[in-house]
Image (cartoon, helix red, strand yellow):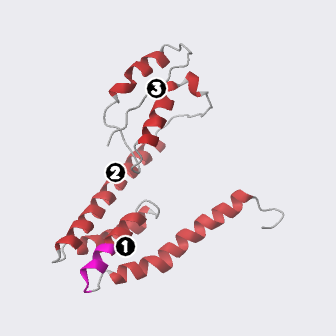
Amino acid sequence: MGEQETSEDVGSHYDLSFLDITCSKLLPVVINASKDRVPNIKFNVAKVLQSLIPIVDQSVVEKKIRPCLVELSEDPDVDVRFFASQALESSNQANRLFQSIMELINRDWRVTFSHGPREKNMLADGLARMANVNIRGLQTLEEFPEILKQVFDDDASRVPRIRPIRIPYVD
């Protein structure tokens, strides 16, 4: 690391190098393995491709990963079809999320971020606790969690007080 480079610079080089290597070296090998005759190889290809969807550029997903998964989803082996279909659904969810994020980013608004102690925003603290209890990748909420409605009302009234939140374990 040179004198002018910060740890952030090194981190961004690492991220870029990792993605470059993934797309230029690993992805072609994985896609080539999708042509193997052995079903276990092919369904593991689908699993690997599914794990790459969230980390590679959307154009790579559309041009390389999705066509391979579509082909695998038509494989004679039931397990290969299952894992390929599961990966395609993951790709569809990621695409919808990406589109939603881009729509939000492209709106004409001004956003600022500031830190507030958890005691003054128990709702955010409760949501963070829910995510930590139910770790299963990205979570989106279609409906407001019933357990946090009172917390929301309390936060909205700007009554600062410490309120312990018990989030039950949900399996």
Q: How far apart are marks 2 and 3 (CA)?
A: 32 Å
Q: What is the C-alpha distance between the residues marked 1 and 2? A: 18 Å
**Residue shown at the point (46%, 63%) measured from the top left:** 57
| Stretch of the chain drawn in magenta | 37-44
Instruction: Read off the residue under disc 3.
Output: 165
Image: 32 above or below 46: below
Q: Are marks 2 and 3 in contact (CB under 8 Å)?
A: no
Amino acid at pointer 2: Arg
Q: Is mark 1 on a helix, strand or loop?
A: helix
Q: Is residue 138 left or right of residue 85?
A: right
Residue 111: x and y in percent read 56, 34
Residue bearing mark 1: 64
The mark total stands at 3
Quarter of the figure that contains the N terminus:
bottom right
Q: Which residue position holds label 2?
A: 96
* 100, 50: nearer the viewer: 50
Compute the Cα span from label 3 to label 1. 45 Å
